[in-house]
């Protein structure tokens, strides 16, 4: 048993169990070795416990709150205020630059993007080049009695299904206006809905009578206006080449009256000198205040209408006239006449009255009128004509039956 302590000394410290308590009579070296081993073991256990407690404290401890003194807090606040001020000044400068250069940017965008600059309202396209001009072989022309000394060009626009021959205005007017050159175009052919899709000359499609505002053919208006405005431009250029001031009057029956109203009511100043329309209606009436130009408010217009018209009815005509005469349009030179016992046609008597009216506004020299004997024998809207005048109208209708449009035909 005396050799046991010596054997134990050779066992590694971490691989043996607790050593026995040394005997009281052990030597100092043995006591020293045993005490050193016990101390090492205790220090190791304490180190492991300390590491475990430290890990637990780090897992459960909250981060310490920052402690800033007053000077550092003020510096940080001032820094944030400066950043906010710099950002506000930057945004103000950007806004000012955008406001200054926005028109230029918009113009640049429009030039780069054709869809952005395309007009959205139909009247804004009336003066654009047409996709197909009028057939020059179907434009009827009658030179003025004065020849190249003429001073006015009259554009005569026919009705639905007709063709350009100047009727009815060239029956009497050329003799009364020797200084007027006459031009009568023919519309393109199309399948017209109201005529059971029959092919015929038409300035636009129509779907029903007498409800002419049902599905208006606005694109048809646009195309024909482009064609007619191009024709007017050509006639104006011809007059300029001859050293004349361009002077244009327009006249139309039925669909031709619709075209004449659009031409005169959308024209810039001094483009159309006067207009005469027979048996027609005001197109796009619900938004007339938007498309009627302010320059046209003083263009003389004579509107004549038969009271017995069953296609383009008198009530529709009166609605259009009222729209033009009342605010906000306030047309100042529109005159409206109705004729008893007259359907959708025209008469010699109607043309003679129109001739007298035109003499009031379109003289040989602009601003100088020729003397006339009578002007406007008919009564205002709503008044009845004397019996002898009614007979005269009926007689005139009979005399013009061979050349007038069929009262029961299409407009």
Image (tube, rainbow, N blue to C red):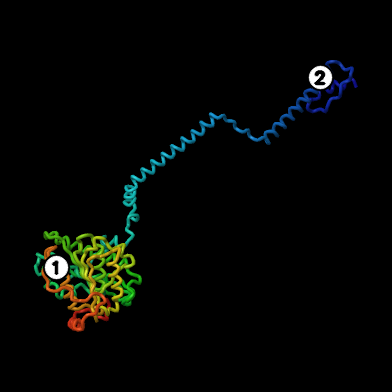
Numbered circle sitting on residue 380: none
- Please state which of residues 220 and 69 is positioned toward the viewer in this rendering: 69
> For numbered disc 2, what is the local secondary structure?
helix
Residue that appears at 25% across and 68% down? 259
Residue 114: quadrant of the picture:
bottom left
Quadrant in the picture for the N terminus: top right
Q: Residue 244 appears at what percent x and percent y?
A: 12, 60
Quadrant in the picture for the C terminus: bottom left
- Please state which of residues 70 and 15 is positioned toward the viewer in this rendering: 70
| Residue 66 visible to the viewer | yes
Residue 6: quadrant of the picture:
top right
Q: Which residue lies furthest to the right in this view?
A: 1
Q: Residue 338 appears at what percent x and percent y?
A: 24, 76
| Residue 185 visible to the viewer | no
**Residue named by callout 1:** 181
| Disc 1 residue crowd, few under 14, some 14–19, many 20+, Cα 10 Å | many
Q: Residue 296 appears at what percent x and percent y?
A: 24, 63
> For numbered disc 1, what is the local secondary structure?
strand
| Disc 2 residue crowd, few under 14, some 14–19, many 20+, Cα 10 Å | few
**Left or right of 378 on screen, residue 11:** right
Sequence order check, earlier mark of 1 and 2: 2
**Residue named by callout 2:** 33
**Left or right of 310 on screen, residue 49:** right
Residue that appears at 49% across and 33% down? 78
Q: Which residue lies furthest to the top in this view?
A: 28
Marks 1/2 in contact by CB < 8 Å: the verdict is no
Q: Nearer the viewer, mark 1 or mark 2?
A: 1
The alpha-carbon separation of the residues under discs 1 and 2 comes to: 142 Å
Q: Residue 158 appears at what percent x and percent y?
A: 22, 72
The correct choice, above or below, for 205 with respect to 79 in the image is: below
């Amino acid at each position: 048993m005396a050799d046991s302590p010596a054997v134990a000394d050779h066992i590694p410290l971490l691989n043996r169990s607790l050593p026995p308590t040394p005997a009281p009579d052990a030597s100092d070296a043995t006591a020293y070795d045993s005490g050193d081993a016990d101390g090492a073991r205790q220090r190791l256990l304490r180190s492991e416990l300390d590491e475990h407690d430290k890990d637990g404290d780090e897992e459960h401890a909250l981060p310490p709150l920052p402690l800033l003194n007053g000077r550092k807090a003020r510096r940080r606040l001032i820094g944030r205020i400066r950043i906010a001020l710099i950002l506000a000044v930057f945004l103000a400068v950007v806004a000012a630059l955008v406001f200054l250069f926005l028109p230029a940017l918009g113009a640049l965008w429009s030039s780069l993007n054709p869809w952005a600059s395309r007009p959205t309202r139909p009247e804004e396209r009336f003066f654009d080049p047409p996709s197909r001009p009028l057939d020059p072989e179907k434009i009827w022309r009658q030179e003025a009695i004065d020849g190249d000394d003429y001073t006015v060009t009259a554009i005569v626009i026919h009705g639905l299904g007709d063709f350009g021959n100047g009727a009815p205005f060239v029956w009497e007017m050329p003799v009364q206006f020797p200084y007027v050159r006459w031009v009568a175009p023919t519309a393109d052919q199309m399948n017209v809905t109201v005529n059971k899709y029959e092919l015929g000359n038409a300035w636009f499609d129509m779907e029903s009578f007498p409800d002419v505002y049902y599905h208006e053919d606005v694109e048809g208006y646009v195309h024909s206006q482009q064609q007619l405005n191009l024709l007017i431009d050509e006639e104006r250029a011809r007059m300029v080449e001859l050293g004349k001031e361009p002077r244009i009057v327009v006249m139309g029956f039925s669909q031709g009256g619709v075209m004449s109203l659009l031409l005169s009511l959308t024209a810039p100043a001094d483009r159309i000198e006067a207009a005469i329309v027979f048996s027609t209606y005001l197109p796009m009436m619900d938004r007339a205040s938007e498309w009627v130009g302010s320059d046209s408010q003083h263009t003389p217009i004579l509107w004549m209408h038969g009271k017995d018209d069953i296609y383009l009815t008198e009530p529709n005509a009166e609605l259009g006239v009222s729209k033009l005469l009342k605010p906000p349009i306030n047309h100042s030179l529109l005159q409206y006449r109705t004729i008893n016992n007259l359907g959708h046609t025209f008469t010699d008597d109607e043309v003679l009255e129109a001739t007298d009216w035109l003499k009031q506004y379109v003289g040989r020299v602009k601003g100088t009128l020729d003397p006339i004997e009578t002007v406007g024998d008919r009564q205002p809207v709503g008044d009845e004509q004397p019996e002898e005048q009614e007979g005269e109208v009926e007689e005139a209708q009979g005399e013009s039956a061979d050349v007038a449009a069929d009262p029961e035909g299409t407009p």
